[in-house]
Image (cartoon, helix red, strand yellow):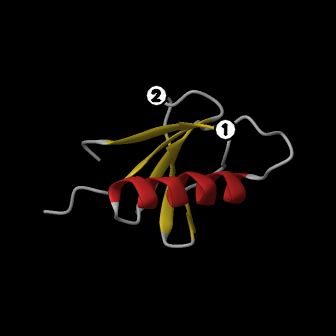
């Protein structure tokens, strides 16, 4: 992903799925496209997962409670 949107969500009552969907909904409203990848801090997930068509990947570059969400660069 070359560009994307950084989303912060520290709601302790919501699970990861809810937070990713919340960020994806906002992204889609703002940019007109559904995101297909979201990078999260490694403490948020054990392994890569897919949620509602969005691949969740771990990255040390993303702070806890932050979500780097966008579209993968497809060749």
Which residue is at a point 77% across and 53% down the rendered structure image? 15
Q: Position of residue 60 (x, y in %)?
A: 50, 30
Q: Is residue 39 above or below residue 30?
A: above
Label at residue 9: 1
Camera-nearest label, 1 or 2: 1
Label at residue 61: 2
Which residue is at a point 40% across and 66% down the rendered structure image? 34
Which residue is at a point 38% across and 52% down the rendered structure image? 70
Q: Nearer the viewer, residue 64 or 21?
A: 21
Which residue is at a point 70% across and 52% down the rendered structure image? 16
Q: Nearer the viewer, residue 29 or 35?
A: 29
Q: Is residue 68 above or below residue 24?
A: above
Instruction: Point out the tag, 1 or 2, that comes first from the N-terminus.
Output: 1
Left or right of residue 47, residue 33 in this image: left
Question: In the image as oriented, which residue stretches furthest toward the left?
Answer: 75
Q: Residues within 10 Å of mark 2 (few under 14, many from 20)?
A: few
The local secondary structure at tag 2 comes to loop
Question: In the image as oriented, which residue stretches furthest toward the front?
Answer: 29
Q: Position of residue 22 (x, y in %)?
A: 62, 55
Q: Position of residue 48 (x, y in %)?
A: 54, 57
Q: Nearer the viewer, residue 23 or 71?
A: 23
The local secondary structure at tag 1 comes to loop
Label at residue 48: none
Q: Position of residue 25 (x, y in %)?
A: 53, 60
Question: In the image as oriented, which residue stretches furthest toward the bottom?
Answer: 52
Left or right of residue 31, residue 9 in this image: right
Left or right of residue 39, residue 19 in this image: right
Mark 1 → mark 2, Cα distance in angstroms: 16 Å
Left or right of residue 14, residue 31 in this image: left
The C terminus lies in which quarter of the figure?
bottom left
């Amino acid at each position: 992903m070359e560009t994307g949107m950084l989303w912060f969500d520290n709601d302790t009552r919501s699970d990861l799925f809810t937070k990713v969907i919340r960020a994806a909904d906002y992204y889609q409203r703002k940019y007109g496209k559904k995101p297909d990848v979201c990078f999260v801090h490694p403490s948020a997930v054990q392994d890569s997962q897919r949620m509602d068509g969005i691949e969740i990947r771990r990255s040390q570059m993303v702070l806890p409670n932050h979500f780097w969400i966008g579209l993968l660069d497809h060749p």
